[in-house]
Amino acid sequence: RDWPPAQLPAIVPGARSLELGLPSLPGLIAARVGIELIRAVGVPTIEARVGALAGRCIEGLLARGLPVRTARAPADRAGVIAFEHPAAESLAIYLRRHGVDVGGYPWGLMRADPHAFNDEDDIDNLLAHIDSFA
Protein backbone atom coordinates (compact mmCIF):
# COMPACT_ATOMS: atom_id res chain seq x y z
CA ARG A 1 0.00 0.00 0.00
CA ASP A 2 1.31 3.46 -0.85
CA TRP A 3 1.40 6.29 1.66
CA PRO A 4 2.65 9.89 1.44
CA PRO A 5 6.48 10.01 1.70
CA ALA A 6 6.33 12.65 4.46
CA GLN A 7 4.18 10.43 6.68
CA LEU A 8 5.03 7.08 8.25
CA PRO A 9 2.57 4.23 7.83
CA ALA A 10 0.26 3.44 10.72
CA ILE A 11 1.49 0.94 13.30
CA VAL A 12 -0.43 -2.29 12.93
CA PRO A 13 -1.69 -4.21 15.96
CA GLY A 14 -0.43 -7.64 16.98
CA ALA A 15 2.65 -9.55 15.94
CA ARG A 16 2.84 -7.84 12.54
CA SER A 17 4.10 -4.72 14.34
CA LEU A 18 7.37 -6.62 14.97
CA GLU A 19 8.05 -7.40 11.31
CA LEU A 20 11.27 -6.06 9.88
CA GLY A 21 10.81 -2.74 8.17
CA LEU A 22 14.23 -1.34 7.30
CA PRO A 23 17.60 -3.00 7.67
CA SER A 24 19.83 -1.85 10.50
CA LEU A 25 22.05 0.63 8.68
CA PRO A 26 24.63 0.81 11.52
CA GLY A 27 24.62 -3.00 11.56
CA LEU A 28 25.34 -3.08 7.83
CA ILE A 29 28.32 -0.77 8.33
CA ALA A 30 29.68 -3.00 11.09
CA ALA A 31 29.09 -6.10 8.99
CA ARG A 32 31.01 -4.55 6.11
CA VAL A 33 33.99 -3.84 8.36
CA GLY A 34 33.89 -7.42 9.64
CA ILE A 35 33.73 -8.83 6.13
CA GLU A 36 36.67 -6.64 5.08
CA LEU A 37 38.67 -7.91 8.06
CA ILE A 38 37.92 -11.53 7.16
CA ARG A 39 38.96 -10.90 3.58
CA ALA A 40 42.19 -9.19 4.70
CA VAL A 41 43.17 -11.96 7.13
CA GLY A 42 41.91 -14.76 4.92
CA VAL A 43 39.52 -17.59 5.68
CA PRO A 44 42.28 -20.25 5.61
CA THR A 45 44.22 -18.32 8.29
CA ILE A 46 41.12 -18.00 10.45
CA GLU A 47 40.25 -21.67 9.94
CA ALA A 48 43.74 -22.76 10.99
CA ARG A 49 43.65 -20.52 14.06
CA VAL A 50 40.25 -21.77 15.19
CA GLY A 51 41.32 -25.36 14.57
CA ALA A 52 44.44 -24.95 16.69
CA LEU A 53 42.48 -23.38 19.56
CA ALA A 54 39.79 -26.06 19.36
CA GLY A 55 42.46 -28.75 19.44
CA ARG A 56 44.11 -27.20 22.49
CA CYS A 57 40.75 -27.03 24.24
CA ILE A 58 39.83 -30.63 23.39
CA GLU A 59 43.20 -31.90 24.61
CA GLY A 60 42.78 -29.99 27.88
CA LEU A 61 39.27 -31.29 28.44
CA LEU A 62 40.30 -34.88 27.74
CA ALA A 63 43.27 -34.51 30.10
CA ARG A 64 40.75 -33.59 32.79
CA GLY A 65 38.71 -36.71 32.10
CA LEU A 66 35.77 -34.82 30.63
CA PRO A 67 33.95 -36.63 27.81
CA VAL A 68 34.22 -34.62 24.59
CA ARG A 69 31.50 -35.11 21.97
CA THR A 70 33.22 -33.04 19.30
CA ALA A 71 35.13 -35.00 16.66
CA ARG A 72 38.82 -35.41 17.49
CA ALA A 73 40.07 -35.22 13.90
CA PRO A 74 40.57 -31.57 12.86
CA ALA A 75 39.12 -32.25 9.40
CA ASP A 76 35.89 -33.48 11.00
CA ARG A 77 35.12 -30.53 13.27
CA ALA A 78 34.43 -26.82 13.37
CA GLY A 79 35.16 -24.33 16.13
CA VAL A 80 32.38 -25.62 18.37
CA ILE A 81 33.39 -27.87 21.23
CA ALA A 82 30.74 -29.92 23.00
CA PHE A 83 31.71 -31.68 26.20
CA GLU A 84 29.96 -33.27 29.12
CA HIS A 85 29.99 -32.10 32.71
CA PRO A 86 27.67 -33.35 35.46
CA ALA A 87 27.02 -29.79 36.69
CA ALA A 88 26.93 -28.10 33.28
CA GLU A 89 24.48 -25.32 34.17
CA SER A 90 26.28 -24.41 37.40
CA LEU A 91 29.67 -24.58 35.71
CA ALA A 92 28.47 -22.28 32.91
CA ILE A 93 27.26 -19.71 35.45
CA TYR A 94 30.57 -19.97 37.32
CA LEU A 95 32.60 -19.58 34.12
CA ARG A 96 30.57 -16.58 32.94
CA ARG A 97 31.14 -14.89 36.30
CA HIS A 98 34.85 -15.31 35.60
CA GLY A 99 34.66 -13.86 32.09
CA VAL A 100 34.49 -17.14 30.18
CA ASP A 101 31.57 -17.21 27.74
CA VAL A 102 30.22 -20.77 27.37
CA GLY A 103 26.89 -22.54 27.24
CA GLY A 104 25.73 -25.03 29.85
CA TYR A 105 22.59 -27.11 29.51
CA PRO A 106 20.48 -29.05 32.02
CA TRP A 107 21.18 -32.37 30.32
CA GLY A 108 24.89 -32.12 31.23
CA LEU A 109 26.33 -30.71 28.02
CA MET A 110 28.66 -27.72 27.71
CA ARG A 111 29.54 -25.70 24.63
CA ALA A 112 32.66 -23.62 24.05
CA ASP A 113 33.25 -21.70 20.82
CA PRO A 114 36.80 -20.41 20.39
CA HIS A 115 37.28 -18.17 17.37
CA ALA A 116 39.96 -16.11 15.67
CA PHE A 117 39.67 -13.33 18.25
CA ASN A 118 40.59 -15.77 21.03
CA ASP A 119 44.08 -16.89 21.98
CA GLU A 120 45.80 -19.65 23.94
CA ASP A 121 45.39 -17.70 27.18
CA ASP A 122 41.61 -17.80 26.71
CA ILE A 123 41.67 -21.59 26.41
CA ASP A 124 43.98 -21.90 29.41
CA ASN A 125 41.66 -19.59 31.37
CA LEU A 126 38.66 -21.81 30.54
CA LEU A 127 40.53 -24.93 31.64
CA ALA A 128 41.89 -23.31 34.81
CA HIS A 129 38.40 -22.20 35.85
CA ILE A 130 37.02 -25.67 35.17
CA ASP A 131 39.73 -26.91 37.55
CA SER A 132 38.88 -24.32 40.21
CA PHE A 133 35.16 -25.14 39.92
CA ALA A 134 35.86 -28.80 40.65
Image (cartoon, rainbow, N blue to C red):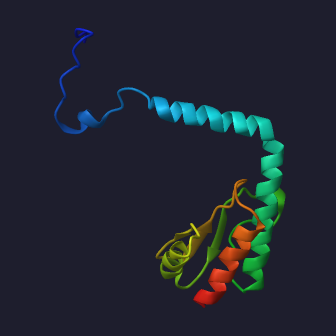
Rendered location of residue 132, percent (x, y): 62, 88
Q: Position of residue 38 (x, y in %)?
A: 73, 39
Outermost residue, bottom direction? 134
Residue 67 seen by the camera: no
Give me the residue at 70% from left, 54% from top. 117
Please tell me whether residue 133 is drawn above or below residue 21 in the rendered image.
below
Location of residue 118 in the rendering, given as x and y in whole percent from the top left corner? 71, 60
Task: Name above or below for residue 2 compared with residue 9.
Answer: above
Quarter occupied by the C terminus: bottom right
Is residue 96 left or right of 123 when viewed as pictured? Answer: left
Q: Which residue is at a point 59% across and 70% down the rendered structure image?
A: 100
Q: Is residue 66 above or below residue 112?
A: below
Indicate the quadrant where residue 13 lies.
Answer: top left
Residue drawn 79% across the image and 41% down it: 41
Q: Is residue 108 left or right of residue 34?
A: left
Residue sitting at 75 percent across and 80 percent down?
Answer: 62
Quadrant assignment, res 74 = bottom right
Counting the numbered discs, the total is 0
**In the figure, residue 17 lies in which quadrant?**
top left
Quadrant location, the N terminus: top left
Can residue 78 be seen by looking at this rendering?
yes
Residue 50 x %, y %: 76, 56
